[in-house]
Image (tube, grey):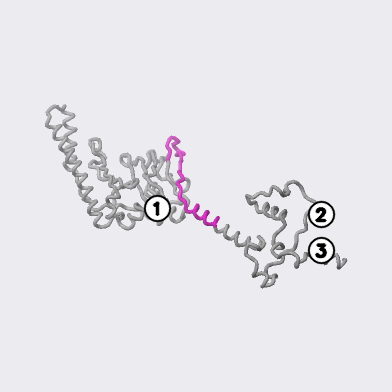
């Protein structure tokens, strides 16, 4: 090889500023960007998709010295922006990867409801619908799903043979289901709370419709009870307010029934009906041991508390009052909410 020709082909470092050697040729920069699938376009550069170019028509890529090969005094005079993009790429790549990881982690924390809808294979007209919580923290979802399924479907979650409904629906050996007409409503679902009302028809010696509401802490998966949302003083005041509300409704109903029975215009069968209703309410108690078993439904800034009907199954047809419902404004009860009540319902 001709030594003179070889030396003449090398770039003259004394005649070129060093930063120009650290910049890639424009055409290759576009090719590199294309390879990285960036959103920037280089319309003034030929695209690789247009066909292969001949080696002798492409500009020779200059060899770029690695930064550690540059003399310290020269390197100190260069700004960070003067370095070739390939030396900055590891940092940019790591930052981008970290950002994507944060987005994915955020998505992974998002809970959602997957409705489980199944027909009874033995009685195709019986359709069962049940909420299965997914996403987010797996320990939390398993804890919540296990509680709901064990309470409602008499089954240990994950131990079912064919279906989560297999212990409650009809079979060839069991002509009556334990639970039928199973449905649900989502009362509240946000970053802090998951509240669902399950309804169905429960059957044993007799069948009766029921509604139950479960409210879970999505941070721990714990089931929240009404008493845990209030301070001890708040529990006493709420308890007194609920008893008073029920007593007032019963007293008003008793006065109404007395007035009807005193009218002396009733048919014998009607008089018996109102007399039985009056007896029902005269013997209805408004005494409770604690708030823990009270059903509550969280609303926007409110709690609807449902409790204590007076009738049993056999005489429910004469119970006009049915369940008692009292709605309280959480803004007014704010100073009586417990720490968890404030955290979950006021933030």
User: Where is residue 100 shown, x and y percent of the image?
Assistant: 55, 55
Q: Secondary structure at mark 1?
A: loop
Q: Secondary structure at mark 3?
A: loop
In the rendered image, the vertical position of residue 338 relative to residue 277, given as above or below: below
Q: Are marks 3 and 1 in contact (CB under 8 Å)?
A: no
In the rendered image, the vertical position of residue 125 relative to residue 59, given as above or below: above
Left or right position of 152 against 291: right
In the rendered image, the vertical position of residue 213 relative to residue 101, given as above or below: above
Any magenta on residue 269?
A: no
The residue positioned farthest toward the bottom in the image shown = 72
Residue 172, quarter of the rendered image:
top left
Q: Earlier in the sequence, mark 3 or mark 1?
A: 3
For the residue carrying disc 1, how many other residues have a C-alpha within 10 Å: few (<14), some (14-19), or many (20+)? some
Residue visible at 63% across and 65% down? 79
Front residue of this view, candidates 153 and 101? 101
Front residue of this view, candidates 76 and 98? 76
Question: Where are the magenta residues, as a range?
Answer: 99-128
Q: Nearer the viewer, mark 2 or mark 3?
A: 3
Q: Secondary structure at mark 2?
A: helix
Q: CA distance from mark 3 to mark 1?
A: 69 Å
Q: CA distance from mark 1 to mark 2?
A: 65 Å
- Which residue is under mark 2? 56
Residue visible at 73% across and 47% down? 49
Left or right position of 192 against 239: right
Q: Nearer the viewer, mark 3 or mark 1?
A: 3
Left or right position of 214 against 255: right
| Mark identifier at residue 9 | 3
| Mark identifier at residue 192 | 1
Residue visible at 41% across and 56% down? 219
Q: Nearer the viewer, mark 1 or mark 2?
A: 2
For the residue carrying disc 2, how many other residues have a C-alpha within 10 Å: few (<14), some (14-19), or many (20+)? few
Left or right position of 75 against 240: right
């Amino acid at each position: 090889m001709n030594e003179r020709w070889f030396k003449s082909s090398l770039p003259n470092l004394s005649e070129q500023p060093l930063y120009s050697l650290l910049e890639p040729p424009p055409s290759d920069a576009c090719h590199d960007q294309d390879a990285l699938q960036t959103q920037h376009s280089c319309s003034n550069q030929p695209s690789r998709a247009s066909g292969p170019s001949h080696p002798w028509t492409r500009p020779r890529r200059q060899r770029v010295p690695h930064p550690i090969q540059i003399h310290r005094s020269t390197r100190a005079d260069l700004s960070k922006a003067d370095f070739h993009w390939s030396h900055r790429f590891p940092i940019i790549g790591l930052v981008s990867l970290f950002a994507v990881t944060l987005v994915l982690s955020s998505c992974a924390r998002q809970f959602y409801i997957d409705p489980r809808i199944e027909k009874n294979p033995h009685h195709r007209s019986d359709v069962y619908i049940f909420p299965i919580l997914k996403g987010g923290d797996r320990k939390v979802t398993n804890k919540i799903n296990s509680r709901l399924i064990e309470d409602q479907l008499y089954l240990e979650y994950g131990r079912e043979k064919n279906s989560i409904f297999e212990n409650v629906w009809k079979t060839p050996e069991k002509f009556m289901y334990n639970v039928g007409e199973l449905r649900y409503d989502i009362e509240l679902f946000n970053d802090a709370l998951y509240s669902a009302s399950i309804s169905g028809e429960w059957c044993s010696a007799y069948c009766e419709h029921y509604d139950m509401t479960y409210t879970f802490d999505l941070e721990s998966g714990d089931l929240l009870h009404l008493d845990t949302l209030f301070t001890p003083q708040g529990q006493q005041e709420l308890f007194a307010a609920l008893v008073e509300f029920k007593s007032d409704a019963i007293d008003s109903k008793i006065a109404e029934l007395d007035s009807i029975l005193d009218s002396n215009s009733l048919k014998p069968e009607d008089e018996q009906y109102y007399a039985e209703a009056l007896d029902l309410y005269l013997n209805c108690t408004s005494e409770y041991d604690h708030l823990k078993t009270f059903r509550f439904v969280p609303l926007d800034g409110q709690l609807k508390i449902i409790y204590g009907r007076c009738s049993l199954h056999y005489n429910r047809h004469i119970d006009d009052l049915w369940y008692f419902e009292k709605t309280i404004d959480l803004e007014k009860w704010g100073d009586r909410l417990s720490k968890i009540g404030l955290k979950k319902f006021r933030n």
